[in-house]
Image (cartoon, rainbow, N blue to C red):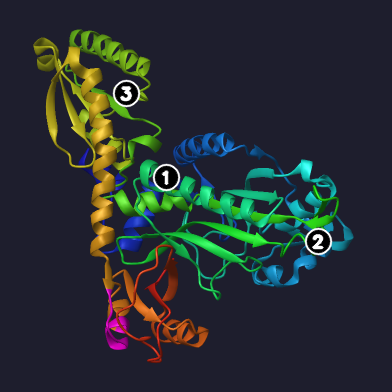
Amino acid sequence: MLSDRREIGITVRKGNDFSEWYTQVVMKAELADYSPAKGFMILRPYGYAIWERIQKLLDREIKKLGHQNIYFPVLIPESLLAKEADHFAGFIPEVFWVTSAGDTTLGERLAARPTSESIAYASFSKWIKSWRDLPLLLNCWNSVLRAEIKGTKPFIRTSEFLWQEGHTAHENEADAEEEVFRILELYRSLMEKVLAVPVYVGYKSEKEKFVGAEYTITLEALMPDGRALQMGTSHNLGQNFSKPFEIRFLGKDNKEHYAWQTSWGVSWRLIGSVIMTHGDDKGLVLPPRIAPIHCVIVPIYYNKTDRQEIMSESERIEESLKSRKVRTHTDNRDHYTPGWKFHHWELKGVPLRIEIGPRDLKAREIVLVRRDHGKKVRVKIDSVETAVIDSLRDMQQHLYELAQASLREGTTEAEDYSELSSSIEKNLGFVKAAWCGAESCEEQVKNETGADIRLIPLAKEEARTACLVCGKESKHLVYFAKAY
């Protein structure tokens, strides 16, 4: 069995070779696999189950805010994309084009959806006629295709990815702004309370904002290798799309107006953030709220009599936990040893494990093991439900607290350009720095260090120095980091 463990286990340490460790966790925990088509990824059942958990929880909250789900076609005529030329220009290097159907050459190229603004807003112009048609609050669960030219990484950078994209139209600017921020808070809650991944929130610079937006608000997390990960964005589009797409309505004043719009989205990159943030040298560690299995029961027996009694008790415990909405699975496979099963479910990140053997049954106890810290506690069988539910709640909070501490430790402030460059070179995480607001200074840092301005914090932070690049008066204290 030792050879089996070496084969399925993680063979590198997270702290020694982060990239290889990440790839092994994705593959060996059976979350995803590489596709025969370069740049594309197969989402395996266990990975899809995690995505379904995220999707279910987020979809419920989106609908609570009044949004309805919709689906737009995957192929978009080039003429529609050209209506907002500046926006589309940013996607041109990544677009997959369909130019023929069978042996017939198409009269107009069709783009495989890189994002849905153009096809959605062409429809908005038909559907919105009066102020009574507003707000229009729509959400899509779909995939988009962007030819990944920077190198692929499962869940983080692939040529096709699953995501959620919201598109809304409003009667006035204030309503659109309110939408941007309520979605922002919805995303923040998802990331911190569900994924247990803390984030910084702020504006993108003009250079980094979504092309076509008045402004973009981003949620940025810090991964253990010191790189930032953009977790989601919420964009105020103003009237920058409603004018070229002629999304007009008759207002209450009997005058014609252009709609005010927003768009926002998160992708399966959220799964990548969970793997990186919480995983350890044994494999995946899943926050309970997104774990497909909360608790796995591993029966331990040595003969047929033991097996019958222990399996009977295991099944009773399983049904009892399921009645309390604890997603529970009993591993009753006889062809694997208990030790092999322990390692298997640890690799897959299941939050809790229950061990029950002949001595445990005789004492009317089980052994409860938490995945995050590995501690074992003995629990009376009559108290299993309470112990499991309490442990899941505590583990969810513990994972967040650990990640929050890492975020704090990975955030520093530079007092001069040398310190900024040195911190970025060492991949120390987010580096706060004074910035004058000039794109030339932003570009210089990018060219010389590889770091971007990840965000300008929503809650303005006062800079203690002049701009670290040019020495002029600073306008913002911004967060620099290298990013995925």
Q: Is residue 97 visible?
A: yes
What residue did someone put label 3 on?
333
Given the image, on which type of amino acid does mark 2 rest? Leu
Which comes sooner in the sequence, label 2 or label 3? 2
Name the secondary structure under disc 3. loop
Q: Is residue 35 visible?
A: no
Residue wearing tag 2: 80
Q: Calculate the distance from the C-alpha at mark 1 to the C-alpha at mark 2.
A: 35 Å
Name the quadrant of the N terminus. Answer: top left
Q: Is residue 464 left or right of residue 217?
A: left
Residue at image mark 1: 189
Q: Amino acid at mark 1?
A: Ser
**Can residue 419 be found in the magenta stretch?**
yes
Of callouts 1 and 2, which one flags the residue occurring earlier in the amino acid sequence? 2
The residues colored magenta run 413-421
Which amino acid is tagged 3?
Arg
